[in-house]
C-alpha cells in the first residue's frame, strides 16, 4: 500500500539521530563508519547548522541527507529514502533544498561520494544532472598513523 501522508522537509536535529541512523543502517549504497557515530554527527551538524535535512511524514522520518561545506565546496552524504517512499521526488526535493542552502551560503559547487558498485545510486544522481569527474580519484588515510596497522585494514 502506498503511503499518503504529507511529507515535510526540516532541519536534521541531533534528536533525530537514532531514527536516521536506523534508516541508514543496512540501506544499499550507504557505508557507515566512525564518522557516523552520534558524537561525530553532532559535530557535523554544529559545523553545518541548518544544512542537513530529514523528510518527516507525520512524525515518522522517511528520508534524510547530510549536507555541509568546507567553505569552498559543498558535500552531500548518505541521501536515503525508505523504499516505500521512493519514486515520488523526495530525494530530488532534499537535494534541491540542500543545493539552495549551499548556494545561499556562497558555495558554488557540490560534490558527492558514490560507491563504484552503486548502480541505482548512479542512475539517480545522473538523472539529476550530476556528472562523473574522470580527472579525479579519491585518496584517503587516517589522520593518526597509530590508527593504522596490519590488523586494522589501513
Image (cartoon, grey):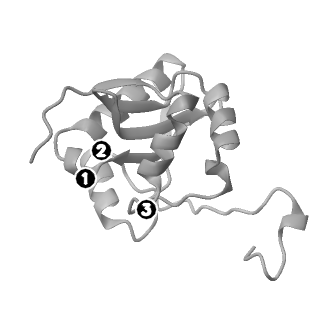
Residue at coordinates 75% horizontally, 63% vertically from top-left?
Answer: 141
Which of these two is toward me, 90 or 117? 90
Picture quarter containing residue 121? bottom left
Disc 2 to disc 1, C-alpha distance: 22 Å
C-alpha distance separating marks 3 and 1? 12 Å
Instruction: Describe the element under mark 1 as helix, strand or loop.
Output: helix
CA neighbours of label 2 inside 10 A, class few (<14), some (14 to 19), many (20+)? few
For the C terminus, which image quadrant? bottom right
Residue 148 sits above or below residue 102 on the image: below
Which residue is depicted at the point 38% across and 63% down?
28
The quadrant holding residue 3 is top left
| Number of marks in picture | 3
In the drawing, what numbered circle is on residue 129?
2
Residue matched to label 1: 83
Kindly identify which numbered label has been placed on residue 26.
3
Is residue 145 something that shows in the picture?
yes
Q: Nearer the viewer, mark 3 or mark 2?
A: 3
Q: Is residue 153 above or below residue 21?
A: below
**Among numbered discs 3 and 2, the one appearing first in the sequence:** 3
User: Residue 91 location in percent, x, y?
Assistant: 30, 40
x and y percent of residue 18 in the render? 52, 42
Amino acid at each position: 500500500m502506498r503511503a499518503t501522508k504529507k511529507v515535510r522537509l526540516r532541519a536534521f536535529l541531533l534528536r533525530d539521530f537514532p531514527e536516521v541512523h536506523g534508516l541508514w543502517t543496512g540501506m544499499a549504497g550507504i557505508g557507515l563508519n566512525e564518522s557516523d557515530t552520534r558524537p561525530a554527527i553532532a559535530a557535523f551538524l554544529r559545523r553545518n547548522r541548518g544544512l542537513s535535512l530529514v523528510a518527516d511524514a507525520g512524525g515518522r522520518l522517511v528520508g534524510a541527507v547530510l549536507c555541509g561545506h568546507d567553505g569552498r565546496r559543498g558535500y552531500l552524504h548518505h541521501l536515503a529514502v525508505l523504499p516505500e517512499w521512493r519514486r515520488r521526488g523526495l530525494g530530488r526535493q532534499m537535494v534541491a533544498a540542500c543545493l539552495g542552502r549551499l548556494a545561499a551560503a556562497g558555495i558554488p559547487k557540490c560534490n558527492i561520494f558514490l560507491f563504484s558498485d552503486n548502480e541505482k545510486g548512479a542512475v539517480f544522481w545522473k538523472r539529476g544532472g550530476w556528472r562523473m569527474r574522470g580527472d579525479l580519484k579519491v585518496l584517503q588515510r587516517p589522520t593518526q598513523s597509530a590508527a593504522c596497522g596490519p590488523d586494522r585494514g589501513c
